[in-house]
Amino acid sequence: MSGAEMHGATKDGTTRYAAKFPGAAKGHFRDAHRMIMSSLGMGTYLGQPDAKTDESYTAAAITAAESGINVFDAAINYRFQRSERNLGAALKQLAAKGYARDEFVLCTKGGYLTPDGAMPGDPNDYFFREYIQPGVFTAKDIVAGSHCMTPKFLKNQIGRSLKNLGVSCIDIYYLHNPESQLSEISKDMFLERVREAFTFLESAVEAGEISYYGMATWNGFRQEAGARDAMQLAEIAQIAQEIAGGRHHFRFVQLPFNLGMTEALTLGNQAPPAHIIGAHARTVMEAASDSDISLIASASLLQGQVARNLPGFVAEALGLANDAERALQFVRSSPGITTALVGMSKAAHVHANAKLVNLAPATEEQFTNLFSRGESA
Ligand SMILES: NC(=O)c1ccc[n+]([C@@H]2O[C@H](COP(=O)([O-])OP(=O)(O)OC[C@H]3O[C@@H](n4cnc5c(N)ncnc54)[C@H](OP(=O)(O)O)[C@@H]3O)[C@@H](O)[C@H]2O)c1
């Protein structure tokens, strides 16, 4: 293996990647924690766990990489590990086409129990053999029958994800929907589990298996502050700070953000910084900026629902050729969003969405217009 293959994304590699797209608009490539990341990223959540979808995802990932998209997002449980393997297959083919490992930002997640490739005839037997018998987890580590974030489990899952992706380092490793544990355990116990997970993840950074870690969430940062599964970003970042000081690697948070779910920008659900007297509650975007954490948007098209039939004022404010472009333009142009993830199992959707690579993000004026027109609509 060459040096480039052995490591993850680097500043040099991702800069080299961006230079391959001289037509990319200013603002398409963004610097986040010494990685140059595209404003659009490819997601791999949806679709059947079958061979046809495998082929389609691998082809779509190659098209994405050849079109100016260098951020790829998976989770070990997506399509029973097949999405990670599809990205791994794409990376191999991309290496043969002259794209090195260090040009891509590979992101994946752990937390949900998943079978291997297909649902086994007897899932209980599968999990007993693979996990309980070898001592990876015990029944008391599992929440809601499906979620776990103990260090032992995460270590096992990172090992599997590295193998699935065919790499030696994952650039961003997320705890997958950690807030789901709050349905069963107390806030104090949750924060203690986060501390144990982060302590392990810092050691995984040290070992070179991951470069950064984060939380990929669904409800946790979109709820009113008092909700049972609401989280405070500053409190979570403080845990990382206590473990590893200012050089900690908790640097990415993923959350849904799209034209139908705008909370990260509009809802003040984060406590104001204690050192600023009289400060107002913060949005997640503000809180992330306070803690030097980059935000990655998931479900940028609201799982396809905002790719069509948008109200006319969106076209008036943003222009562009169609609603899918407008929906993605909204997300990638929002202050504080580094990358807008869009699920694309089909190369045709990659071609369509990659048109934005050569288009500048919306101006502040267009963005403000969108909100003022939205309010009066
Ligand atoms: N909690 C979490 O951690 C979490 C939750 C949700 C999502 N995510 C991440 O975020 C990624 C994006 O979210 P998502 O996949 O759930 O939803 P999404 O990106 O909002 O929508 C994906 C859907 O939109 C379709 N699509 C893509 N481009 C289109 C276009 N130009 N016109 C019309 N339809 C288009 C896709 O079709 P095809 O597949 O047919 O191309 C797919 O069905 C996920 O893949 C995943 O990586 C994370």
Image (spheres, rainbow, N blue to C red):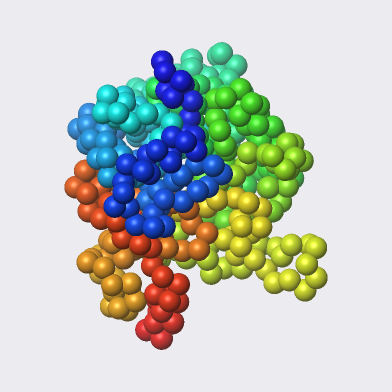
- Residue 79 vertical placement versus 120 (above, below): below
The residue at 63%/39% (across/down) is 249
Quarter holding the N terminus?
top left
Residue 143: image quadrant is top right
The residue at 60%/33% (across/down) is 149
- Tell me if residue 160 can be seen: no
Counting the numbered discs, the total is 0
Q: Is residue 92 left or right of residue 127?
A: left
**Residue 289, x across and y down, in percent:** 61, 57
229 or 309, nearer to the observer: 309
- Residue 331 vertical placement versus 124 (above, below): below
The residue at 22%/31% (across/down) is 55
Q: Report the residue that reaches farthest toward the bottom.
A: 376
**Residue 186, x across and y down, in percent:** 70, 46
The residue at 69%/53% (across/down) is 234
- Residue 17 vertical placement versus 153 (above, below): below
**Residue 296, x across and y down, in percent:** 48, 51
**Residue 215, x across and y down, in percent:** 56, 44
Q: Is residue 33 left or right of residue 48?
A: right
Q: In this view, does 93 lie to the left or right of 26?
A: left
- Tell me if residue 272 can be seen: yes
Quarter holding the C terminus?
bottom left
348 or 102, nearer to the observer: 102
152 or 125, nearer to the observer: 152
